Amino acid sequence: MTAPRPTIVSFDLDGTLVDTAGEIAEAANLALREVGLAPRPLPAIEKLIGAGSRELMLRLLRSAPEANAAVDVETLRARFSFHYAAVAGSSCRAYDGCVVTLERLRAAGIRLACLTNKDERHSRIILEAVRIDAFFEVLVGGDTLPVRKPDRRVVERVLQALRGTASTMAHVGDSATDVQTARNAGIAAWAVPYGYNGGEPIESARPDRLFVTLPDVADFVVDTRN
C-alpha cells in the first residue's frame, strides 16, 4: 500500500537548512574562556553539535581534560546563550538548494514548519538572517514548549496548528534526535547526511528516507503529488 502523500513537512534548522556551526563555535569558545577552559577548534565543536545547547556544553566539559567539578554545566550554558545572542545570524548561511526547495514545496501547496532545539528567539534571528522565515507557518523552538525534541509533543504542536494528521506529515533533520522525534510522533522520519549528528553517520539512526540534498526532498514530495 502506498503511503499517503505528505501535506506537511517540518525541517530541523541547524545542520539541515542552515550551517550555523561557525557562530555556535564562536559563542561556545567565548563561554569556555569565561570559565577558564581552553577554546576548541571548529571541527572539534562541530562533531559535538546535534542534541541542543545543554548537551553541547556537557560534551565540551567531558572532552576538556582541564575541566573540574567547579565548572557547572548550567553556568556554562547560560554564558553560551548570552554570547550566542550576540553572534546569532552573523555568519550562518543557508545550505545549497535550501531556498529553492522551500519555494517549490510551498508552490506545491505543502505547509511548512521548523522544529528545532535552538531557543525560539535565536531561531527567529537565524531564519530572518538567511531570509527563509516567511516560508514557515509554525516555528517550535527548544523553549517554545515545556518539552523539546525528541518529545512527540513538538510534532503534535504543528499538527494542531495546521490541522494535520500524522499520516500526512514528514520531518526532515540531520540527527538521531530528529529521527527519534519523528518516530515518537508516528510521522515519516527523513534525513540529510551533511549536518550535525554528534560525529556519527545519520544512517545509523535508520531514517525512513535519506536525501542527499535538500532539492531531492522537493523532487520526491512534488513528484509524488503529480
Image: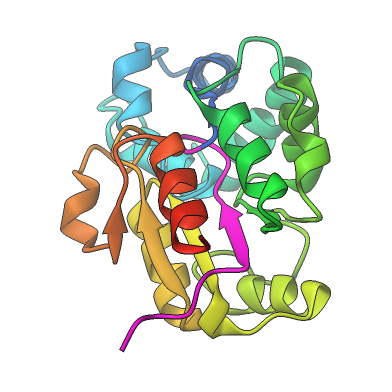
Where is residue 166? Give x, y as percent.
56, 83
140 relative to 48, above or below: below
Location of the N terminus (image quadrant)? bottom left
Which residue is located at x 74 percent, y 57 percent? Answer: 143
Residue 158 painted magenta: no
Where is residue 197? Give x, y as percent.
32, 43
Residue 207 visible in the displayed image:
yes
Residue 142 visible in the displayed image:
no
Where is residue 44? Give x, y as percent.
29, 21
Tell me which corner region of the image, top left, top right, bottom left or bottom right, holds residue 149: bottom right
Where is residue 212? Give x, y as percent.
29, 37
- Marker count (numbered): 0
24 relative to 60, above or below: above
Which residue is located at x 70 percent, y 11 percent? Answer: 90
Q: Nearer the viewer, residue 68 or 4?
A: 4
Which stretch is magenta?
Answer: 1-16
Tell me which corner region of the image, top left, top right, bottom left or bottom right, holds residue 41: top left
